[in-house]
Image (spheres, rainbow, N blue to C red):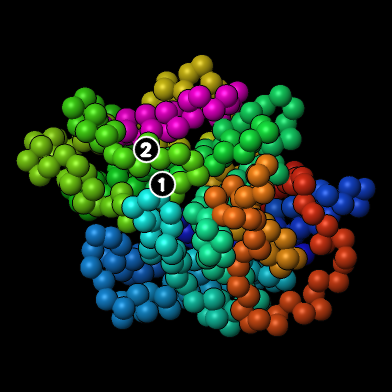
Amino acid sequence: MRVLGLMSGTSLDGIDVVLADFDRDPEDLATLRARLLHVGEEPWPETTRRALRAVLPPAPADIASWNRLHAQVGEAFADAAAWVLARHGGADLIATHGQTLHHDVRADGTVAGTLQIGDASRIAAATSTPVLHDLRAADVAAGGQGAPLVPILDQLLLGGDAGEATAVLNIGGISNLALVGTEQLIAGDLGPGNALLDAAVHAATGQDADHDAALARTGTVDAAALATLLSEPFYARPLPRSTGREHFDSGYVQRMLGAEALAALPLPDLLATLVELTAVTIADGIAGLGATRVVVSGGGIRNPLLRERLAARLAPLPLLDADDLGIPADGKEALLIALLGYLGAHGLPGTLERADGTAHTGARTPVVLGSLTPPHALRGLLREPVDTHTVEHFEIVTTPWEED
């Protein structure tokens, strides 16, 4: 089954696209294999990206703006999918995460609802391909956090490595963790990854990010400001937990530090402090879990200062790139979405079951994720009874893929 996965995270860096052929190992039906045909990133239309930034909390937004963005995001995803599929002869299914606009976490840490936009009907119309979408809602309806979803990929890829308790880390706008390869699966969001850094740079300079940490490297960590930021109650919540830009928004640092204290911080010092905040909260989240290694992916690892500080905070634990283990770091989340598309199409849960029968997200039970547009689209496609066999292992076939 050929599945195209589309993913855009909270950083709005671009639309990640992975096209993969999935099949079962005929000698071990519990092993699902993926042959990667394309791994790449398509740019957001700049007007759409600006419009998305303009409605993210704490900015006010009316329902008309969200409605227009639902259509625009759908069109952007449709264009990205159509361009890749035209080069590879199509696909059986498109799976899309959409763009998160709101993730509603209650005061007690439970999730009231989650909203990802991006009109699936526009993607289906542009590509003549069925689309699986709305991947988080079913987990939230079952009492889960709806996030993170990546642990199922982490467990299938890395959980079987003998003697390795692996902390699998993704640093996007928000950082998240899955501990795999142990009897007890642990997963959840750790805190801000790039979100606060990017917001601070954008507010001060209009740029999207502090590229290569050029500004942060010239700054000094403000110990008092760091201590105040670390007093955030979210960090004391047990895993599983989730958060988003609704909480760690562009006004968050000012609310925590106060306007006067923030104004007194030179931008390089503020950025150095926020880099340290991300490194400390990640390292603290991993400490005590018994991990023997940390495998990292996501846009945040492109920040060389963050990588250095994280490595220092984690030492002596080794910090490894996902690429070094044969996992495309830049396309990992899009590969996850493609995998969830395959699982959902075959009626298989998209979350992992813990020892007590609950899901790794805290849901009452693992559930099948996603909604299908159009609803009848996969009729006749799922012919192989082998495809409904439980997936226990996942392998990436090591053949070259196209990368843009």
The quadrant where residue 51 appears: bottom left
Determine whether 37 is above or below 289 in the image. below
Q: How many marks?
A: 2
Determine whether 319 is above or below 239 in the image. above
Q: Nearer the viewer, mark 2 or mark 1?
A: 2
- Residue bearing mark 1: 174
How packed mark 1 is, by other alpha carbons closer than 10 Å (few <14, some 14-19, many 20 or more), is: many
Determine whether 261 is above or below 206 in the image. above
Task: Determine which of the numbered discs, if any, sits on residue 235 in the image.
Answer: 2
Which quarter of the image is occupied by the C terminus?
bottom right
Q: Who's the residue at 21% across and 51% down the image?
A: 251
Q: Check disc 2 and give the amino acid type.
A: Tyr
Q: Is residue 276 magenta?
A: yes
Residue 163, position as x, y percentages in the image? 71, 24
Residue 173, position as x, y percentages in the image? 39, 48
Q: Who's the residue at 45% across and 39% down the image?
A: 238
Out of 295 and 137, give the one closest to the viewer. Answer: 137
Q: Tag 2, which secondary structure?
A: helix
Q: Who's the residue at 66% across and 32% down the image?
A: 182
Q: Give the left or right position of residue 73, taking residue 197 as reference.
A: right
Residue 262, position as x, y percentages in the image? 13, 40
Residue 122, position as x, y percentages in the image? 53, 80
User: Is label 2 in contact with label 1 (beta carbons under 8 Å)?
Assistant: no
Q: Who's the residue at 89% across and 47% down the image?
A: 28
Task: Determine which of the numbered discs, if any, sits on residue 127 in the image.
Answer: none
Q: Residue furthest top?
A: 316
Q: Is residue 336 visible?
A: no
Out of 401 and 329, give the one closest to the viewer. Answer: 329
Q: Is residue 287 magenta?
A: yes
The magenta span reads 273-294
